[in-house]
Amino acid sequence: MTEVASSLPPPIRRPDVSPARLARRHAAERRFRLCALAAVVIAAGMLLALIGTIAVQSYPAFFETRIGLDVDFDPDVIDPAGTRAPADLGDANYAVLVRRALEKVFPEVRTRRDRRALKRLLSADADLALRDMVLGNPALIGTTQRVWLLASDDVDSFVKGLIAREAPQETRRIDERMAAWIDALAAAGRIETRFNATFFTAADSREPEQAGILGAVVGSALTLIVTLALSFPLGVLAAIYLEEFAPRGRWADLIEVNINNLAAVPSIVFGLLGLAIFLNVFGLPRGAPVAGGMVLALMTLPTVIIAARTAIKAVPPSVREAALALGASHMQAVLHHVLPLALPGMLTGAIIGMARALGETAPLLMIGMVAFIAEVPRGFTDPATVLPVQIYLWADSPERAFVAKTSAATLVLLGFLAAMNAVAVILRRRFERRW
Amino acid sequence: MHLVPLPTTGPAPTATAGRLAAAADADAQTAAFAVRGLDVHYGATPALRNVDLDIAHHRVTALIGPSGCGKSTFLRCLNRMNDLIADCRVSGRVLFNGTDIYAPGTDPVSLRARVGMVFQKPNPFPKSLYDNVAYGPRIHGLAGDRTALDEIVETSLRRAGLWDEVKDRLDAPGTALSGGQQQRLCIARAIAVAPEAILMDEPCSALDPIATARIEELIDELRTEYTIVIVTHSMQQAARVAQTTAFFHLGEVVEVGATERLFTDPRDARTKGYITGRFG
Ligand SMILES: Nc1ncnc2c1ncn2[C@@H]1O[C@H](COP(=O)(O)OP(=O)(O)O)[C@@H](O)[C@H]1O
Ligand SMILES: [Mg+2]
């Protein structure tokens, strides 16, 4: 039987290239491409929508409203004794000057209640602004100046059109009377909308118009410095040891598995660990960048180790062999040849880990970085907050003006994240595969 | 200085065992490398079995044999590069100038400074030409100052026949050279450490015929100062450059002899089969 079969040559099968079959194949390819393209478009569209919404919402936060008043720096109020001593100038009652300047514009306002409402047109700390002007330039005393004082957040929102005129009287933050005043001020050219520099130069504040992002930016920077300073050297050393020197075997496998597990641990767990160890055992200050940085370093360490090990693995063994065959010690081969080649990859990994740490909130809440901090932190042990926590705090605030601030802070955070990722990409491009 | 092929087949009669061992020991003292009873395993798989081989000073010894027969493994035993492979076990004795390099207390780092190596695929460092050659002298403290180092770099590149081609661009990266130039750079890099022996593992297998001819010329020149062991898959190359040839087969040394004799009058049937192209 087999002989019969083998005596006949097997039929030759040629590829089926009939037009119908080819058309079907091409159609399938087109469908696939279309689906893939649709996926990309949808993803890009969602990203654009997200960033677009944030940008539109944050727009008002980048502008502030100021009210121009002619302030009479009356020496009798500021410096009745005539000493010009900074202590005396600082103690003076500048609120009187503000009140007088307002009364000059609205002489018809008489009742106590109305006057108080009038004062609410201005930000709460208008008198402090005058004090700082006088302390900075005592020559102002005795003169009358047009001073552009920060308007209150309600006036600001009203001027920006965020509070509707038609809203029912009882629930409105700006009533008919105040609206009339604002209109009068505007008609007199005493209302200006300017770029909001305060947002970038101030720390948090209870008053939305005085709240800024700088405190959180500095807090984030200080925290990340601690994180980088701890996690990068530790991570690189650990990776070098594990990759180059650790004996292979069960222990190495165990460590490897656990590092990978650690990278997947929810970040809040690191916060709990930080609370238990760094605050309660080591007694580090609550809510300080040093503690926050240490917690985030714990969190990023596995990422850095994994990235560094990958970078070391990517160095061709021939480089290592070449060095060893010349009589370099193992450490020399690693330090002189492997490390320089792996460094860009390690840095890339570290930056991506830092970007993740920058956006982290949960573990920092655990160690008390969630407090209201009205000062820009000056050092690693000052109480501080960080960008994402600041966003969380503002999002939680009832004032209308904090809505825009929340979006603006988000935009700033996204900007930093994008910048860090760009640096990582540039590093990778720059040093990619030089061997 | 003359290399005596060792008896590799059949156990020696007990009466003469002592005398033979004594003779072998005498050889071991005069040879550059004297390998005795070398066994190498990768995990449980044997790669070399009971290899005895003497390699003479200032000669080129070629190792030939079908692929996978253990030539590279043998070569890497001579400078302990096998130490880098985790599951590689070596037993037996390898004497280099009379001292056992596998004895406890031998430092592979200082051994490798005396026994250089050139790899199959050129592997210059991704650094400048200068730094490639200067690296060895630097780590071994061979040059006191920059001028001395410059001199070592120049002489090494000259000896490797590369100086005239690269003297104007010593700052260029080593990886930017052609394959043949890269391999000569690797040879210069090995020479710069002033080793006593140089091991080459198929140094021309990635090169074109012209570059190969350059390297072969170079090997012939270097013979006067260095003991050279070269693994090659080309019998013509062995015939051109080597004075002694060893034929490996399935992890054993089948036959060793003067190159010309081995190719014209092989004594073992397996050698004959290989060089006449019946297998391998
Ligand atoms: N690193 C290694 N791990 C396991 N087995 C190896 C390794 N290197 C070589 N071998 C095995 O050892 C034998 C000899 O290899 P090798 O010395 O490279 O042969 P050759 O150089 O003669 O072609 C081969 O069977 C090969 O599969
Ligand atoms: Mg080989």
Image (cartoon, grey):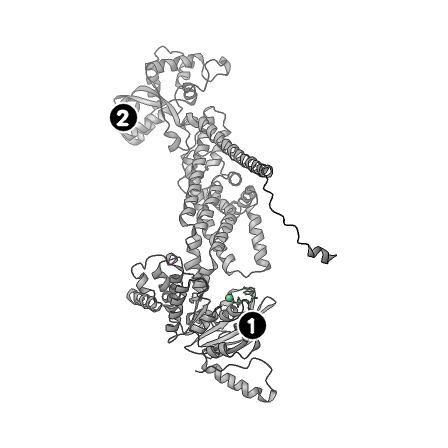
Residue at image coords 29%, 27% = A134
Q: Amino acid at mark 2?
A: Ala
Q: Neighbour class for label 2 at 10 Å: few (<14), some, many (≥20)?
A: few
Ligand 1 near label 2 (Cβ, under 8 Å)? no
The answer to whether residue B7 of the structure is visible from this angle is: yes
Chain designation of label 2: A
Q: Residue furthest right?
A: A1
> Neighbour class for label 1 at 10 Å: few (<14), some, many (≥20)?
many
Percent across and percent down for residue A10 are 66, 52
The circle on residue B249 is: 1
Numbered badge on residue B214 = none
Q: Can you say which quadrant of the picture contains the C terminus of chain A? A: bottom left
Give the x, y percent position of residue B55: 47, 77
Please name whichever residue, B132 or A117, is drawn nearer the observer in this view of the structure.
Answer: B132
The quarter of the displayed image where residue B195 is located = bottom left
A347 vs B147, left or right, is right
Task: For the N terminus of chain A, give its image quadrant.
Answer: bottom right
Name the element at disc 1.
Answer: strand
Q: Is residue A426 above or below residue A338?
A: above
Question: Closest to the observer: B135 or A15?
Answer: A15
Residue pictured at 27% horizontal, 26% vertical = A81
Residue interval drawn in magenta: B169-174
Disc 1 marks a residue whose amino acid type is His
Residue located farthest toward the bottom when viewing the structure as drawn: B15
Task: Please give the chain letter of the residue carrying mark 1.
Answer: B
Q: Quadrant of residue A351?
A: top left
Residue picked out by circle 2 = A81
